[in-house]
Amino acid sequence: MSHNSFGHLFRFTTWGESHGPAIGCVVDGCPPGIGLSEADIQPFMDARKPGTSRFVTQRKEPDQVKILSGVFEGKTTGTPISLLIENKDQRSKDYSEIKDRYRPGHADFTYDAKYGIRDYRGGGRSSARETANRVAAGAIARKILGDDIIIRGAVTQIGTSLIDGDQWDWDQVSQNPFWCPDAKAAKDWEGYLDNVRKSGNSVGAIVEVQARGVPAGWGAPVYGKLDSDIASGLMSINAAKGVEIGAGFASAGYTGVENADEMRMSGGKPEFLSNNSGGILGGISNGDTIIARMAIKPTSSILTEVQSINSKGDEIDVRTKGRHDPCVGIRAVPVAEAMLACVLADHKLRHRGQTGN
Amino acid sequence: MSHNSFGHLFRFTTWGESHGPAIGCVVDGCPPGIGLSEADIQPFMDARKPGTSRFVTQRKEPDQVKILSGVFEGKTTGTPISLLIENKDQRSKDYSEIKDRYRPGHADFTYDAKYGIRDYRGGGRSSARETANRVAAGAIARKILGDDIIIRGAVTQIGTSLIDGDQWDWDQVSQNPFWCPDAKAAKDWEGYLDNVRKSGNSVGAIVEVQARGVPAGWGAPVYGKLDSDIASGLMSINAAKGVEIGAGFASAGYTGVENADEMRMSGGKPEFLSNNSGGILGGISNGDTIIARMAIKPTSSILTEVQSINSKGDEIDVRTKGRHDPCVGIRAVPVAEAMLACVLADHKLRHRGQTGN
Amino acid sequence: MSHNSFGHLFRFTTWGESHGPAIGCVVDGCPPGIGLSEADIQPFMDARKPGTSRFVTQRKEPDQVKILSGVFEGKTTGTPISLLIENKDQRSKDYSEIKDRYRPGHADFTYDAKYGIRDYRGGGRSSARETANRVAAGAIARKILGDDIIIRGAVTQIGTSLIDGDQWDWDQVSQNPFWCPDAKAAKDWEGYLDNVRKSGNSVGAIVEVQARGVPAGWGAPVYGKLDSDIASGLMSINAAKGVEIGAGFASAGYTGVENADEMRMSGGKPEFLSNNSGGILGGISNGDTIIARMAIKPTSSILTEVQSINSKGDEIDVRTKGRHDPCVGIRAVPVAEAMLACVLADHKLRHRGQTGN
Amino acid sequence: MSHNSFGHLFRFTTWGESHGPAIGCVVDGCPPGIGLSEADIQPFMDARKPGTSRFVTQRKEPDQVKILSGVFEGKTTGTPISLLIENKDQRSKDYSEIKDRYRPGHADFTYDAKYGIRDYRGGGRSSARETANRVAAGAIARKILGDDIIIRGAVTQIGTSLIDGDQWDWDQVSQNPFWCPDAKAAKDWEGYLDNVRKSGNSVGAIVEVQARGVPAGWGAPVYGKLDSDIASGLMSINAAKGVEIGAGFASAGYTGVENADEMRMSGGKPEFLSNNSGGILGGISNGDTIIARMAIKPTSSILTEVQSINSKGDEIDVRTKGRHDPCVGIRAVPVAEAMLACVLADHKLRHRGQTGN
């Protein structure tokens, strides 16, 4: 059952609410003998953590990961790795007024409909804070995948502003607060997002993640398809509303001739002349770069007043004060990378289990 | 493990290759006491089956489902329901020449990379023929969901031609061979697809599925999200390259104010004034219509010659003769409906299991 | 979910009722490239099938297995293997009178309590006929394990008559209709069982299964323990009431000194001087022979009248006519072997998945 | 995948080693709205914890459980419940000398064979300390089951000394340090175990657990059988070597007439006149008391010297100093109760999911 767990052979289970004492995850199925310490995980945590620029939430969380089990004398032992991240900056007072109010776009109403009870502080379990666990698990997944597989992501669109794909430069991604691979777009986004933020509004984004170096043969027919698991993983990220692989929705408008990724031999190895497939055919990796994109809706917490109801069925107006990201898509990049890493680590082990390779 | 199974409490497992003696599926977890016979399933099979118009493959398959277990005196018994569909029109000779050839866009290369062996006849396990099983399982899922939940789908785009959303008329969907809800677009598509077909080419499509009447509260945080499972289910369909929920990728371009689905009370019940969320918030249904869309790439089997390699590493040109759909997206509609039905049936039982409701 | 499926990486799902048109199973996760045909499976089916001696049920079933998928040109392809076994000798008339009657020891009452409906013919889903599927899946599991792992079983007790362990001779097992490894006991059992049968009664049995050649290292802490999975697998066999590993229940009476399986080196390899552990320590194989035993209760279908109730709540007396095994434990041997083989095949793949070995 | 998780709808995942900073578990799938605090769990922890009498290990652990998530304002929210138990009395020095030594009966050799690395301190992951998590999860399971279902256990045999079943008095169980339901046997065991302990030896035990008040209908065919899951759960407990249900191994020696649990009506409800089935027929509860028994081998850590090898392949003699239980079976009672509770809670939810009851 997959309520709060993800993956099969490489499987992690997360727990924790935004304003509880801590959040954490248990990573099961990690191969033994892999060098692992908090230092391997922390850089990815730092990349996701809030408060790093004016374009993300100002909640201050060090997001320091502690490894509580599964590692001995610097190496994984093959037993479950328990990771703990304390909540340091909860400010529960900020949230008391939303106790009975259903913020549009949030899970307040649906959690109540499902459970009849919810920890309303900061969104409780539905808070994006949960994604810190994914990043931690993803760091372990990267260790399983090894250095030959490069997983990285970027923001390709914020609101109505797109990057110029021809200007894509991976080195730019770390040079701006937006994970933007296009230097000029990054500059534009500063002013754009400042306006959005100041107007008490928010915008959506599109995030692209890639995995280079994945060998052909990972994945499985037909409900364990690599793209199916990537879709599941990315869509489980807070605020995700769409996932596509390779050419994705654009491929609907292509002809078969345009869409065919033709093959030739190159240096004795198969080569694809284009990558509309996003590196996956029939649910199985083809050796080309795996490319996935996801759409993130605009932050639902906005200062602008919107109509809603409360838990008693009264009609109310809601204006969500607090420390919100003007564009949650930005901080989704390391989360999306992590989910891709976890899917791939799982399929590496699954492939090895079935085939021995 | 989910290689050839889908779902948890309502779970089906499929088997079979395009050119074996039969395909089939085993549906486990169906509640007992539900009236079920082949007649409940067959209409959905007929809607998906090939050969019904010149716009789909001319392979002739009656796709007659046989129930081999799990039903007694017209009612489900709660034990596994085994469904069998014989392959009647295999024509294996058609495929002998592709034995060693990797058709671009197909799973030939990746299955070989993974398994080192494949049943190459008609795509074997990767054939869209497998989807007949999904439709059969989906028919059972609909029985579990009951008559108050309406699941239906339509094609909203073929190649570069989109419907006019304002002309959407569900009654039109059964009036044309394209599942098109816009009468005028349907008419345009006839000529458009004839041209595509005659030029030895193919096109992609976008399919939209909706579920009306789903109560608020189904789904689960955070890796068992309803949208995550829908994404997984739809992306597992052959040729799918993208999935979106509600406003989907468009929501990336929205502001928070535009995207907010405001709430009011209506007749004593909560009502959403818009449905950008596609009926799902925080992974849980909100009572509004569930809306999902998927992108289907153009049929990879085309008469136009494209460059490829064979299993020996020789560079070759491939031209795929045979009985192919000029747009596989058309026949994907009942399959997408079925996957949505299966996800919902599973979550109905999962929700009931955890909460008793 | 494991209602009608068993295993994880090597996983089979069974379906079918005693008196439906057929039973079958779908085996998923089999490695590719393994030579497999019906001829590999049939000998195990024949060993389990009814009607082979006067000591087992006289129902005549050829139990001919058909492979419907997953094998191509004599080799497994890595895709699901669907196996079908037709029911040939159903005689539904025999069972009509038990429609509303709860036979003591059978699942009649509990199936009704659970589902409110049941296929009462021949026990329906709860019939021992289901175990034919396990034997078929087990034959595939043996192929995965390879020839170096020898799995075999024997009956060590029938009713109150035990074998003499010192007389254990594996060659005897196939020389008598009881799978008895002790020639003298086998002779005694003939008369003993004839008496039981003629008196309209039945007896229980103990079955022992062993797996020789399993390398050290298979299994997993702590809920995926090899012995835990063996216990689950054997206890799922019809009429099983107990499972033990190695010294089993006897070890409760041992001291730590008596129970310790001391180790020495032998030919450069670790060797255990005794095998009270049954080849498993901490849930992981230790390289010694794996030994498990299960208790099978006496056949519940007996000609002697016993008190019961019917579905209306009337008190009745039940005398079960029909073609019953005087000791179902006898035919449980190939089933127990099969379950052990399936557990081991699953763990072989799981171990390989996690560790690469 | 079930390596370190147990259950399906009610599912817990444990982590932690004997000598790490803490151990813990994550309980997923708990229904919402159930009153829960540490005070509900702690009494069960105290019953299992070490150091309570001279007949169990003298390690001093308060085993104080902290709830880190999933409970809000005293009630479960339906989200994962994370439980943490700190290790307070590790004394790592005690264990440094066994670093390379394989203690007979322990998992030292097999963990090394599997993983090539292990946390050798106190047995690491294979330590019985892990079972504290099970007890915590079991306490939550009991809350799900409600007060009408009574789960309790007792020791029925220590070494070669059995209780007199006719003297069974549940009130006695808490009156002696052995969970013994027979006052006279409890008295005998004091001297018996003192001798065992002083001689540097240990003994095994048999533990019986019962669940009264379970309604008919829980469980599932055929690999989700209630007894199959109980067997799996009990066999996963450290040092367990056998599991039986109802009459268990004794039923092998019964005739069908002796073994039949006849039925009558009593007060308008079905009643069984005996309970050889242990409350389970065809894998489904029949409404009678569920009875399971497990065999626990003698503590492997003994002061008496036994032959073994080390990780370099040298032959050595091992004498295990430290704070060991002379009979680990004693402290297994609350663990076995907890596992039974967890299996039942899972099946309660599974049954409700499928049938709505």
Image (cartoon, coloured by chain):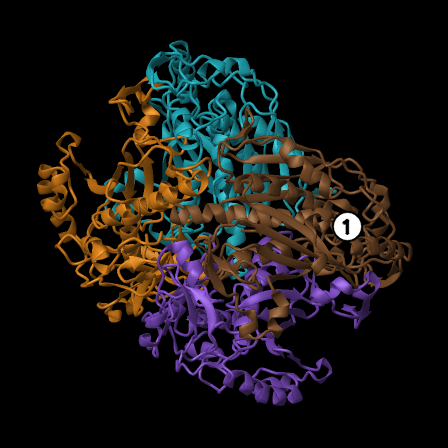
Chain colours: A purple, B brown, C cyan, D orange
Q: Is residue D294 visible?
A: yes
> Residue B89, position in %: x, y?
80, 37
Mark 1: secondary structure: loop
In the depicted structure, whether residue A253 falls above or below residue C253: below
Is C332 above or below relative to A306? above
Residue A80: quadrant of the picture: bottom left
Q: How many marks?
A: 1
Please provide percent x and percent y for residue C328: 44, 24
**Which one is in front, B45 or C145?**
B45
Q: Is C124 drawn above or below residue B82 in the view shown? A: above
Q: Locate residue C6, reporting x and y percent.
A: 50, 42
In the rendered image, which residue does mark 1 sit on?
A: B178
Q: Which image quarter: residue B17?
A: top right
Foreground pick, B284 / D354: B284
Q: Chain of mark 1?
A: B
Relative placement, left or right, of C27 versus B318 is left
